[in-house]
Amino acid sequence: MIPALRSYEEVSLLGEVMAKVKEKQHGKKDKTKRATVSAPSVTTAEVATAMYADGSPLDRVQYLEAKLILKPDRFTSVEAFRDFGKIMQSTAKKVGVGFIEDRETGLRPEIREIIFGDTPDFRLYNNAFILRRRISYVDRFPVGDPEIVFKFRHPDEQRATALDVRPKIASKYRIKFKAEALPLKDQVGGYRILYSHNCQFGLSQMHDADKTSMATLVKVFPALAIIKKSDDERISLVNEGIVEEVLLPLGQLDFGKGVLAKCDISLWRTRGEHKSLVGEYAFQVKFDRREDIAEKQKKLAAQFYIALQRDVEDWLALGVTKTGMVYRLRGNEPQSHE
């Protein structure tokens, strides 16, 4: 039986510690409003005993990914990536977090191409869905099978859990259910959580010739049926934007007791004109159960996350996400759930 999902503060790995820090600093609780989207509404009791329609157990959060969205103007060379890495290492040392440098930090960054697909009225994004394709490049040539990522991202964990993101394909796919920590939208030193329920698989696993019709997408991703208007509608490239991601692995943060977190830094820019959009620093912890992470490690991760925000305050871009920047390439204002 799946244990009952708890409240927002109780379930996030950083939640309890960071909420106390934030309340102490500001003397009040965060009153950030959450957008309502078209997703199944369930109670805690229902989630505790529920299964997906085919009887499979509900997916559980097994990743914590803490992100800092960064202003892009500083990233004019790979040395700027390494400069940020030095600040990050200094912060880690200050709060007692170990660091294991990645051997590839001194090499060239990785290059990946990313595109997003949506309806002309951005119906996927406005309803908390994200659909993207990612291609890796080596020596300027694409390698491997392009990766399709379909996700439902929402601030309510119960809604994110109840939404079955599994694709209807005969081949293998991967589920990644993350709690994503981001700074508050308007101030440094706090946090907000988005729950990202993802599935990933190679593009070659979609055997339909027409991959842009809503009819095909609903067949592969049944969760999209709740927003479909007709079989004739199609998705297209969001804002005609093709993103080039420049990513540099930095290493692993060591929070003790075997809790390691890979961390990296990246820049998103438009392909062709190389217009810089946004940077990001992120670290990620994987776990089988929340109970596997001891309180001491949770507290240390929280301290590091808050301390790093303060140490790189001039770098931070508050109130945005990487995906949101792509959706605003032409000045559009989608109904952000993020």
Image: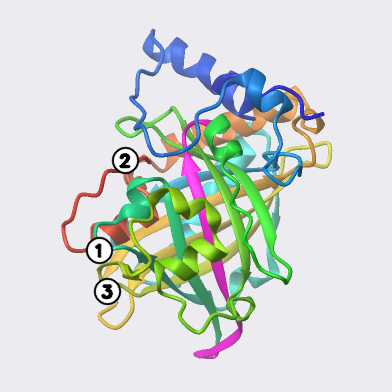
Magenta residues (range) = 139-156
143 part of magenta stretch: yes
* Residue 3 visible from this viewpoint: yes
Give yes or no for contact between labels 2 and 3 (Cβ–Cβ under 8 Å): no
**What label does residue 166 carry, if any?**
none
Where is residue 83? Give x, y as percent. 47, 59
**Which image quadrant: the C terminus?**
top left
Mark whose residue sits in front, 1 or 3:
1
* Residue marked by disc 3: 240
Q: How is the image coloured?
A: rainbow
Label 1 vs 3, first from the N-terminus:
1
Q: Residues within 10 Å of mark 1 (few under 14, many from 20)?
A: some
Where is residue 214? Give x, y as percent. 41, 66
* Residue drawn at the location 29% of the way across and 31% of the way down: 186
**What label does residue 319 carry, if any?**
2
Q: Amino acid at mark 2?
A: Gly
Q: Secondary structure at mark 2?
A: loop
Residue 78, image quadrant: bottom left
Q: Amino acid at mark 3?
A: Glu
Query: What whole-number distance in Å separates the C-alpha atoms at marks 2 and 3?
Result: 23 Å
In-front residue for pair 115/106: 115
In-front residue for pair 128/97: 128
* Residue marked by disc 1: 120
* Residue drawn at the location 60% of the way across and 47% of the way down: 164
From what the image shows, is residue 40 above or below residue 136? above
Q: Residues within 10 Å of mark 2 (few under 14, many from 20)?
A: some
Mark whose residue sits in front, 1 or 2:
1
Query: What whole-number distance in Å separates the C-alpha atoms at marks 1 and 3?
Result: 11 Å
Q: Residues within 10 Å of mark 3 (few under 14, many from 20)?
A: some
In-front residue for pair 118/263: 118
214 part of magenta stretch: no
Give yes or no for contact between labels 1 and 2 (Cβ–Cβ under 8 Å): no
